Image (tube, rainbow, N blue to C red):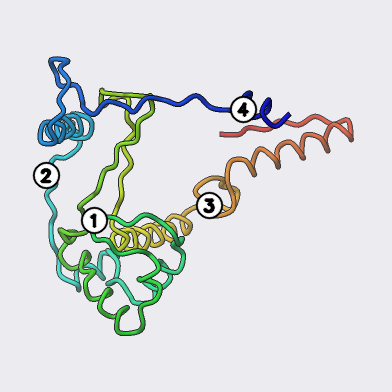
C-alpha cells in the first residue's frame, strides 16, 4: 500500500530551466552583462514613462514659512519610534541590508541619530541611499526567457519605509479632520465593506417591518 501511495503522489521531476533571457531580436543571451542590460531596458520601458521619472521642481521654504502655511513641523522622535514599532518582523532587507529587528533594538541614541538623518522637511529631498531599490524578478511561467513573464518584487530600504509611514500617518490625520462621520473608506476601521454590511442590516430590518427604504451607496 505504501508503494502504491508513493507512486500515485510522486511528482514528476522538471528539467532545470536554461539560463538566459531574450533580447529585442528574440535571441537568447546568457552572459550576465547582457542579461543585466535586457532587464535595464525592460524596467525603463515599464516605469519611466512620460508621466513618471520626470524631474519635479521643489520650492524650498524656511521653517517659519512652513509653520504659517501649515506645511508641517519637523519629524519628531516619537513619530519615528511609533512607525518602527508598527513594522512587521521577518521582512526581507533592502539595499541597505538593515533588518527591521535591528531598528527595533535601537536605544535612545540610535533613535536620535535616525531622527536627525531624516531632513526631508528641511531640504525637500530624500537621502540618496534611501531611494535605491533592489528588484528581484520572480518567474510566473516555467522556463521563462522573456521579461514579461516575470513579476518584479521591489525590496525597499526599511529606513525609507519608516519615513513613508510617518508621512502617511500625518496625511491620515489631516484627512480624518475633514471627513464626515458617515464617510466610509479612507477611515481607519471603517471601510466600504462595513458600509455594505450596515446597508444590508438596515434593509433586513425595514423588510421585517414591511416598510419602504431608499438608500444610496457611492
- Viewport quadrant of the N terminus: top right
Q: Earlier in the sequence, mark 2 or mark 4?
A: 4
Residue at mark 3: 187
- Mark 3 and mark 1 lie on one chain; the one further toward the N terminus is 1
State the residue position of label 4.
9
Q: Quadrant of residue 125?
A: bottom left
Mark 3 vs mark 1: give the one in front: 1
Cα gap from disc 3 to disc 1, whole angstroms:
33 Å
Q: Residue at x 47, y 59 (%)?
A: 177
Q: Which mark is residue 95?
A: 1
Disc nearest the viewer among 2 and 3: 2
| Quarter of the rendering containing residue 43 | top left
Residue found at x 35% / y 31%: 139
- Tag 3 near tag 4, CB within 8 Å: no
Q: Earlier in the sequence, mark 2 or mark 3?
A: 2
Residue ID at (13%, 61%): 60
| Mark 1 element type | loop
Mark 2 or 1, closer to the camera? 1
Residue 100 or 9: which is nearer the viewer? 9
- Element type at marker 3? loop
Mark 1 or mark 4, which has the lower sequence index? 4
Graded by Cα atoms within 10 Å as few (under 14), some (14 to 19) or many (20 or more), the crowding at tag 1 reads some
Q: Which residue is mark 2?
A: 55
Q: Mark 4 falls on what kind of element? A: helix
* Left or right position of 169 against 23: right
> Is 194 left or right of 73, judged from the image as shown?
right
What whole-number distance in Å separates the C-alpha atoms at marks 3 and 4?
48 Å
Label 2's element? loop
Amino acid at each position: 500500500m505504501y508503494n502504491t501511495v508513493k507512486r500515485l503522489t510522486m511528482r514528476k521531476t522538471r528539467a532545470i530551466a536554461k539560463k538566459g533571457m531574450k533580447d529585442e531580436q528574440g535571441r537568447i543571451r546568457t552572459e550576465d552583462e547582457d542579461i543585466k542590460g535586457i532587464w535595464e531596458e525592460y524596467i525603463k520601458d515599464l516605469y519611466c514613462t512620460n508621466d513618471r521619472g520626470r524631474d519635479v521642481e521643489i520650492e524650498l521654504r524656511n521653517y517659519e514659512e512652513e509653520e504659517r502655511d501649515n506645511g508641517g513641523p519637523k519629524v519628531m522622535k516619537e513619530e519615528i519610534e511609533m512607525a518602527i514599532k508598527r513594522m512587521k518582523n521577518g521582512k526581507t532587507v533592502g539595499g541597505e541590508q538593515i533588518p527591521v529587528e535591528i531598528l527595533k533594538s535601537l536605544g535612545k541614541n540610535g533613535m536620535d541619530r535616525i531622527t536627525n538623518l531624516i531632513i526631508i522637511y528641511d531640504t525637500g529631498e530624500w537621502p540618496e541611499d534611501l531611494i535605491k531599490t533592489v528588484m528581484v524578478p520572480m518567474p510566473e511561467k516555467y522556463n521563462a526567457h522573456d521579461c514579461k513573464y516575470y513579476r518584479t518584487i521591489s525590496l525597499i530600504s526599511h529606513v525609507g519605509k519608516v519615513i513613508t509611514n510617518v508621512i502617511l500617518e500625518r496625511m491620515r490625520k489631516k484627512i480624518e479632520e475633514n471627513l464626515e462621520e458617515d464617510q466610509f473608506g479612507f477611515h481607519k476601521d471603517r471601510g466600504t465593506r462595513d458600509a455594505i454590511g450596515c446597508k444590508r442590516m438596515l434593509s433586513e430590518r425595514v423588510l421585517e417591518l414591511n416598510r419602504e427604504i431608499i438608500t444610496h451607496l457611492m
